[in-house]
Image: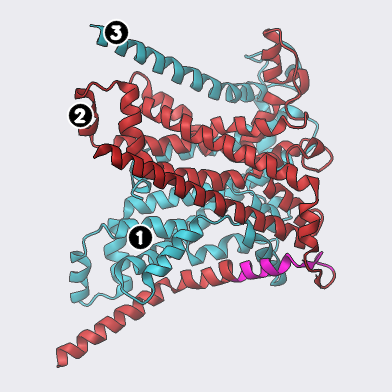
Chain colours: A cyan, B red
Amino acid sequence: MRHKSGLLASKIFIFSFLALLSFVILVPFAYLFTSSLKTNAQYFKIPIEWIPSPALWSNYSYVFVELKFYVFMWNSTFLAASSVVLSVLSSSLIAYGFARFKFPFRNGMFIIVIATMMLPGQVTMLPLFIYFKSIGWLDSYKPLLVPQLFGSAYLIFLIRQFYITLPREIDEAAKIDGCGYLRIWWHVIMPQAKPVLIVSALFTFLGSWKDVFGPLIYLSDRSSYPLAVGLLYFTSPTYNAYTLILVAIVIALIPTLLFFVLSQKYLNKGVNIANLK
Amino acid sequence: MGSGRSKMGIERREKLAGLLLVSPWMAGFLLFGIFPMAVSGYLTFVKWDFLREPRWIGLSNFEGVFRNPIFYTALKNTLIITFGSSLIYLVLGVVIAAMLAKDYLGANVFRAIIFLPSLVIGTALASMMQPVFGNGKYGLLNQVLNLLGLPYQSWLTEPGQAVWVIVAMSFWFLGSGVIIYLAGIKGIDPSYFEAAMIDGANGLQQFYKVTIPLLTPVLLFQSIMGIIGGLQVFDLALTLASEFKTGGMGNENSLATLVFYLYTLAFRDYNMGSAAVVGWTIFIVSLLLSLVIFRLSKKFQLFGEEESK
């Protein structure tokens, strides 16, 4: 009897704790959204008007179309999608090499892959900037995309861990049938590895979508900025219609929602793969 | 004889194919890893502003950086952010994951609410927080304080306070960790929990004696990643500082972090040598902290094993 009431108490405690936390997390979003529908005069009013009247939905079309916010959105999408294709394909091929072939120094090299995963990129940032500047790659997407062709340590690690769990019999059989290594990778290994590849794609997309440092140093033309950097330009003090900045932030949040919905199906699976370590 | 030779041939072919397959990574490691690192080491000893030829100046860059009070502000802020946010990620993250794992009423909704903000672009989240913490008496938090009869605070402009706003923002990024711990907890064999329950362990004891020890590898990996992420905090600070018209790192550099300082030195002051020194500092600090965590986790794991015997 006492045990039961204790369980109920802990249930209530857990529920209230999570509800309070969720409330705190959500309030700034709600505040942002309601403020984005106001004029400056409505915004700078105390107490806060939580349901603005009138609600200025036209703020949205103004920012998105007139202020060309869609350009940032397109740039981000292009960069992130290209990164996914380049990085996932190259990492998957490299991971295939590590998972299925015996060659000298293989294990040593794989340890270096893991080590580079844990190193911060700031040490190599300046020389790479100088390097890309000297070959005239500034103000293009090349410095952000070309290095992806060489694989990402994190993805190589993740995908390789998955590949070694796949049965070897099928690729052995394909080999006996005279299939080349590349064809085995594309037709036998890749289809079996869909879950890990989708997760890798999600991680890469998100990483590119959120990146600020790279675009900030390599790009100087505002019309080529991705969303994460374009937003900084929007918050810059030369702009005095304050609530329009808030509209831009809300617009920047929308793709996140879409991403969340799309990723739900694969998320749990992916996290389990990430936990294999 | 013939088959032996062809077997050798196959082995050699496999060796070659393997090397070929991983060769892009090797090339990338040399081009974008080893070579820039060597150049970055060289940069710490030269004075260079992109315009004139680099000039060898010995240890002057180190002296310049390590004698500059801004460096120590940046270091202090970075360590506050790293430890503050790692603590929130690890401790609160695991507790929340354990709560969500119970699948009580609304767990799915709470999970979504906690996870969603962690997908948001850093600059968007920081911009969103600006009207919450900033904007003087119009700021959301200050209006709440006002309702409670408390005085206004200048969270973003008061030196020494702005950095805590960044720490507080970790609450909104908690979700990425929670989702990983949650999967880890759900992956634990339920028989462990059943055995603990038969032994009379309550929820809290199960959490300490079963969940935490079995999650150690995940916690270890996440804490290292958390620390590396914390040491690299840049976009949040840059966004909050962009509100100041000075183009600096916040009021009295109160928003300086190591990466922000590196960025300022390299791309606003064109002082590549000093920026490289800061880059190496970040590298060495993250190496040291990772080593400490490895050591600590070994101790904890040993402790757990001894206990289970």
- x, y (%) of residue A23? 52, 19
Residue B20 visible (yes or no): yes
- Residue under label 1, please give it: A160
Mark 1 nearby-residue class (10 Å; few <14, some 14–19, many ≥20): many
- Residue under label 2, please give it: B195
Q: Amino acid at mark 2?
A: Ala
Could you tell me how many numbered marks the image carries?
A: 3
What is the CA distance from the residue labelled 3 to the residue labelled 2?
Answer: 22 Å
Q: Are marks 1 and 3 on the same chain?
A: yes
Q: Residue at x 29, y 68 (%)?
A: A100
Residue numbers of the magenta segment: B35-51
- x, y (%) of residue A27? 58, 21
What is the CA distance from the residue labelled 2 to the residue labelled 1?
Answer: 35 Å
Mark 2 nearby-residue class (10 Å; few <14, some 14–19, many ≥20): few
Tell me the chain of label 2.
B
The C terminus of chain B - image quarter: top left
A266 left or right of B171? left
Q: Amino acid at mark 1?
A: Arg
Q: Residue at x 52, y 69 (%)?
A: B28
